[in-house]
Image: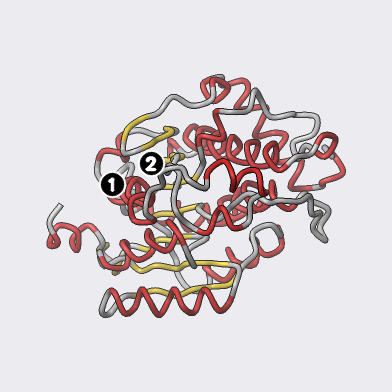
Amino acid sequence: MDQRKQGEDAMTAGGPRVAVVTGASSGIGKETAKALAARGWRVIASGRDADRCAAAEAEIRAAASGAEVEFLRADLSLLADARRLADEIAARTDRVDVLVNNAGGMASALVMTDEGYEGNFAANFLGPFVLTERLLPLLRAAAKDAPAGAVRIINTASDASEMIPSVNFADLQNLGNWSSGAAYCSGKLANVLHARALAGRLADDGIVAHAVHPGTVDSNFFSHTPDHVRDAYGDAPKLTNAEGADTLIWLATADAPGRSSGGYWHQRAPRAPNPHVDDPAYVARFWDEAEKLVKSPAQIA
């Protein structure tokens, strides 16, 4: 795609297309925000740390002259923060053309939030689940004057979603048998199931949803993981942040991803998901249990 076409694709009748990118203060989230801003999109980004957000915003502005980019601070392990972030976005724009649910990671220890949720599962899935639901009016507003498939929701997942036999519907947060690996794998499978469920729910609106496995990336991801994970991946080949973000950016901007929905992608190609993702009854049950959990952790813990 040439630069002129990129600029044309970034515009709507009312101005630039708007992308929301979470977890954009570092890693593949920052690369995605930077690439969209360089293409002429208006980018509303989020991160947990105020200093890293300020540094990332300055870097993106320096890389793309005239970039429309703003960082908002939010910790998506807190559902109240997810709701507040959505409200702050709605105060700044009347449309969202692409939502990139990228924030997440692997925790090295069990931490319960003040809201009563397991922090890692909340950050990887529950917060993005709530944020997405709260932003649906803005996504639907964008879809009204956009071609079918142009408005998109993209969840950053992982091949960890393929490594777990199932989510535990009786205990989505694995509180009865918690481990860092189980928490991470469950959250990443939840990201893929979320995208598949959204595909069916938003089809009539012309909005598509996809999940992506970006690969093993040389980011700060491993600085927060348990020692055994760092040891296992320390010498393994890794992608650069730009390489890891490539499929995210492609899913947000290319024509082809708009012609399908509910996919699980890797290196710009479809990838076979955990078999449960292809079971409509399982996906529906997952959605019901997720909705119960965000209303009250005690219902499923």
Q: Residue at x 81, y 54 (%)?
A: 112
Which of 227 and 266 lies nearest the eye of the viewer? 227
| Residue toward you, 163 or 247 | 163
Residue 72 locus on image (x, y percent): 54, 73
Give the Cα separation between the discs numbered 1 and 2.
Answer: 8 Å
Image height of 115 relative to 278, above or below: below
Image quadrant where residue 70 sits: bottom left
Check residue 15 in the rendering and tell me which mark sits there, or answer none.
none
Question: How packed is label 1: few (under 14 Cα within 10 Å), some, or many (20 or more)?
Answer: few
Secondary structure type for disc 2: loop
Kindly identify which residue carries mark 2. Answer: 206
Residue name at image x 51 percent, y 52 percent: 101
Measured as percent of width and height from the top left, residue 40 is found at: 26, 67
Q: Position of residue 32 (x, y in %)?
A: 37, 58
Instruction: Kindly indicate whether the residue at mark 2 contacts the one at mark 1 (C-beta within 8 angstroms).
Output: yes
The one of 169 and 14 positioned closer to us in this rendering: 169
Query: Which quadrant of the figure has residue 8?
Result: bottom left
Q: What SS does tag 1 mark?
A: loop
Q: Report the disc number at residue 147.
A: 1
Q: Earlier in the sequence, mark 1 or mark 2?
A: 1
Check the image and report above or below for 296 versus 47. Answer: above
Which part of the image, by quadrant, shows the C terminus? top right
The percent position of residue 125, horizontal first and vertical second, equals 63, 46
Of the residues shown, which amino acid type is indicated by label 1? Answer: Pro
90 left or right of 265?
right
